[in-house]
Image (cartoon, grey):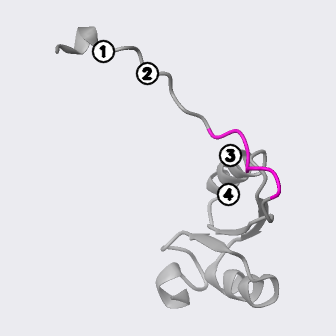
Amino acid sequence: MENDDLPPVSPKRVIGITDNQPQSRILIADDSPSNRQLLIQLLTPIGFEIQVAENGQQAVAAWEHWQPHLIWMDMRMPVMDGYECC
């Protein structure tokens, strides 16, 4: 069977979290404002609760009081980088 014989594949898009799911918290730790903003714009409409940190020290403090389910962390940041946080 050649590729021309395959049916077209429609791209899949995430449009939201399934109903009755607990809200997931994501901490975004990145010193770049544009990177933080991009992730906020992508993840908030889907239904994630977002907090941000501009460096590793802020990320550790946010983790201690907010307990996110996931941390999206830049490994190279000022004050304390992602390597030091781990």
Crowd tier of the residue under label 3, counting other residues whose Cα lies within 10 Å: few below 14, some 14–19, many 20 or above: few
Answer with mark 1 or mark 3, whichever residue precedes in sequence: 1
Q: Amino acid at mark 3?
A: Leu
* Residue pointed to by mark 2: 9
| Picture coordinates of residue 56, whole percent (x, y) | 62, 82
* Residue pointed to by mark 1: 6
Q: Amino acid at mark 2?
A: Val
Measure the alpha-carbon separation of dots 2 and 3: 23 Å
Residue appearing at x 81%, y 50% in the figure: 19
Q: Say which quadrant the N terminus sits in.
A: top left
Answer with mark 2 or mark 3, whichever residue precedes in sequence: 2
Answer with mark 4 or mark 1, whichever residue precedes in sequence: 1
| Picture coordinates of residue 83, whole percent (x, y) | 46, 84
* Residue pointed to by mark 3: 42
Crowd tier of the residue under label 1, counting other residues whose Cα lies within 10 Å: few below 14, some 14–19, many 20 or above: few
Answer with mark 3 or mark 4, whichever residue precedes in sequence: 4
For residue 38, above or below residue 60: above
Crowd tier of the residue under label 4, counting other residues whose Cα lies within 10 Å: few below 14, some 14–19, many 20 or above: some
Dividing the picture into quadrants, the one containing residue 25 is: bottom right
Dot 3 lies on which element? helix
Residue 19 forms part of the magenta stretch: yes
Dot 1 lies on which element? loop
Q: Which portion, as a residue range, is magenta?
A: 14-20
| Picture coordinates of residue 26, whole percent (x, y) | 70, 67
Answer with mark 2 or mark 4, whichever residue precedes in sequence: 2
Label the magenta part by its dominant secondary structure: loop
Q: Amino acid at mark 4?
A: Arg
Closer to the eye: label 2 or 4: 2
Dividing the picture into quadrants, the one containing residue 15 is: top right
Residue 67 forms part of the magenta stretch: no
Outermost left residue:
1
